[in-house]
Each structure stands twice: as C-alpha cells, then as structure tokens.
Amino acid sequence: MKKKSKWIYGVILLLIIITWFFINRSKNKETISLSKNKVQIKVDAYVVAPTVLINEISVSGSLLGFEEVTLKNEIAGRVIKINLPEGQFVKQGTLLVKLFDDDIQANLKKLQSQWSIQEQLCKRQAELLKVNGISQNDYDQSLLQLNSIKADIEVQKVHLRKTEILAPFDGVIGLRNISVGAVIEPSTNLATIRRMEKLKLDFSVPEKYSPEIKQGMKVKFTMYDEANSYEATVIATEHGIDEDTRSLKVRAVVTSPSEHLIPGAFANVLLSFGENKNAIMIPTEAIIPQEKDKSVIIAKNGKAHFVYVKTGVRQASKIEIIEGIQQGDTVITNGIQFLKEGSKLNYSNVKTN
C-alpha cells in the first residue's frame, strides 16, 4: 500500500514540474516577443535633390607612332652599305641599306648591249622593208626580239631597286639589327622607322557611350605619372562594337608631341560628355542589387517602400538615378538589410546633400 502511495505522489510531482516548465516557457516567449516589438531599428536616410553632374569617364589607352614600319628587304642578299643612324631623323627616300648587286649590274649591262645591237638591226630592216628587201614577218620577229630585251632590262632594273632599302617617309630610325657583311633574308628585321611629329592614341569606350564619340572631338589624357595633361583629337572609330568587350575602338591624333610621350606607352584617357544640372544622385550604398534589376528603399508615409530604379553614371561615392525616384524623395542608405516592405522607419541621421 505504501509503495502504491509513493508511486502516485511521484506522478503528481512530475505533472506539477512539467506544468511549471511550460508556463515559464510561454512567459519567456511573450517577454522576448514584447522586447522585439519595443526595439526599433534606426536607419540613415538621404533626401534627394538636383545635383550638377559632369558626365565624364576614364578609360585606358595606348600611344602609337602615327606611321611606324619595320624595315625589311624583298630579296635575300649580302649587306655592303648601311645608313641607319639610330635615334636620328632621316628624310623620305634616303638610302638606308644597300645589298650586293654586281651580278645584277653585269646582267643589266649585257642586256643593254644586246638591246643596242638589236635596235640598230631593226632600223636597217625597217629601211629594207620600205623597198621590199625583207618580208614583214622577218621585221616583226626582229622587233619582237627588241621588245623582249627591253622587258628583260626592266626586270633587271627592278631587281636592282630591290637591293636598296629607302626611307618610306620622314621619320626617326630605331635600333638597327644588322651589320655590314650580314647576309639577310626577306624576313630579317633591319630596323624600325617612326614619324614623331604626330602620335596616335588608341582607346575603347563602353558601348553605351559610343553615340557620343564624334570625329573632331577633343579628349584629354595623362601618362603614368599624371603630372601633365595632354590633348588629342578623335579622327576615326571602328564601324562596329566589339562583340567580346562590348566596346567601341576609337583613334585620336596627338598633334603636339612631347619628349614624355613615347609610342607604346600607357595613357589614361578622360572623356567629357557635358554636364547635367538637374541630375538625381544618391549614395551608392543605397542601391540593392538584384539578379536583373536594381532597387532602393524610399520613405512613404513613414514606412519602407521598395522601388526599382535605372542607374546611369557611377562616381566614387554616388550614382545617378535615371528612373524610379524623383526630387524630394527620402532614400534609405543604412540599415536596409533589416527592412522589409511596410516596415516603420526610425531615423538616426538624415542628409540633404
């Protein structure tokens, strides 16, 4: 009997403990819930106002010689004369390299002698033809032989010209790669020649700016040290957007070269597309990126409201909004990760510019 009573008392005690546990757990949940409702996240905001936006972008470019050629010869041969003054200016048509040509000269003299004899023969036969001393066919054969020799002479003169490498334009000679006595092939790089009074500046702009690029447009650029600014004029663009980079290739000319501007050097090109005095600019941290769109949170009747926006020019700390918000809207800039549609707003800081 005593054992049965102890068992009953134990069951009652266990029930009391379980009941007490669930009552306290419910009270704790209510306390936590009340605490959460009392805690309000404070956010920072920005009041949208029109701003002057200078629409400019910076892109990378390269300087190139306006005219630049690697000198090569058309035929193989032995070098007997060199006139490649490294780093010096030469005029167009200046003889730069001469190859051995004695064999060509000998063949040329031989053909010239044959042509002289054949010419005399044709003159005599022309007189005989007038008195029917020879047939027309014989005279035609002699005239054909004369013209054939003349053509061979022209061929030899062409070979002779190929033994001379002339400056193709006024320019500065680079480093030479040959010496007198060297036997060169058509693939041998002899030296380079560049025009230095003008330089080309090549760069690419993103696709959306391509309609703004016009012939005659002025662009500014700096070199690696950015100590000085230089100017160039757009002369041409590619007639199409590069499919891989989605950009347009542009070429400008630098008409005022400097000793600091070296072909092949990197350049930082600054393009200006005018200014917008009523641009809508907001802090970049207000943008909420999504898979295909961008959105921001604005205050509407004291509550958070998500709106989709279309962006434009991006600067270091601000970004242009083309569509979605307007002047006077209050945009949330900090604490956006804790907000959802319709959340009540409690501000800690509101900026106006």
Image (spheres, rainbow, N blue to C red):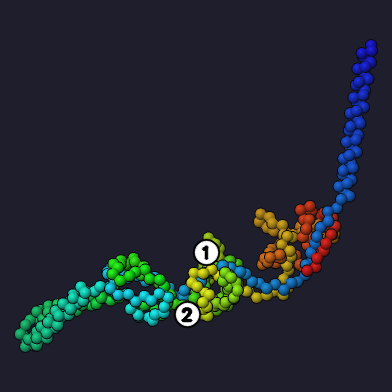
State which quarter of the image contains the N terminus. top right
Q: Nearer the viewer, residue 263 or 154?
A: 263
Label 2: which residue? 197
Residue 74 appears in which quarter of the rendering? Answer: bottom left
Q: Position of residue 311 (x, y in %)?
A: 68, 64
The kind of secondary structure element at disc 1 is loop
The residue beneath circle 1 is: 242
Q: Residue at x 65, y 75 (%)?
A: 274
- Decide: marks 2, 1 in contact (CB < 8 A)? no
Residue density around tag 2, few if under 14, some if 14–19, many if 20 or more, within 10 Å: some
Residue 35 spot, x, y in % from top left: 88, 46
Tag of residue 337? none
Q: Position of residue 279 (x, y in %)?
A: 72, 71
Task: Tell me if I can see residue 251 in this picture.
Answer: no
The spot of residue 225 in percent (x, y) is 58, 70
* Image quarter in which the C terminus is found: bottom right
For the point 57% across and 69% down, which residue is it?
A: 224
Mark found first going from the N terminus, 2 or 1: 2
Q: Answer left or right for 330 relative to 273.
A: right
How many marks overall? 2
Which residue is at a point 50% across and 73% down the rendered structure image? Answer: 262
Q: Secondary structure at mark 2?
A: loop
In the rendered view, tell whether residue 38 sits above or below residue 143: above
Q: Residues within 10 Å of mark 1 (few under 14, many from 20)?
A: some
Amino acid type of the residue that numbered disc 2 sits on in the rendered structure = Glu
Answer with the quarter of the image where residue 143 lies: bottom left
Q: Is residue 315 visible?
A: yes
Q: Amino acid at mark 1?
A: Asp
Residue 267 located left or right of residue 147? right
Question: Nearer the observer, disc 2 or disc 1?
Answer: 2
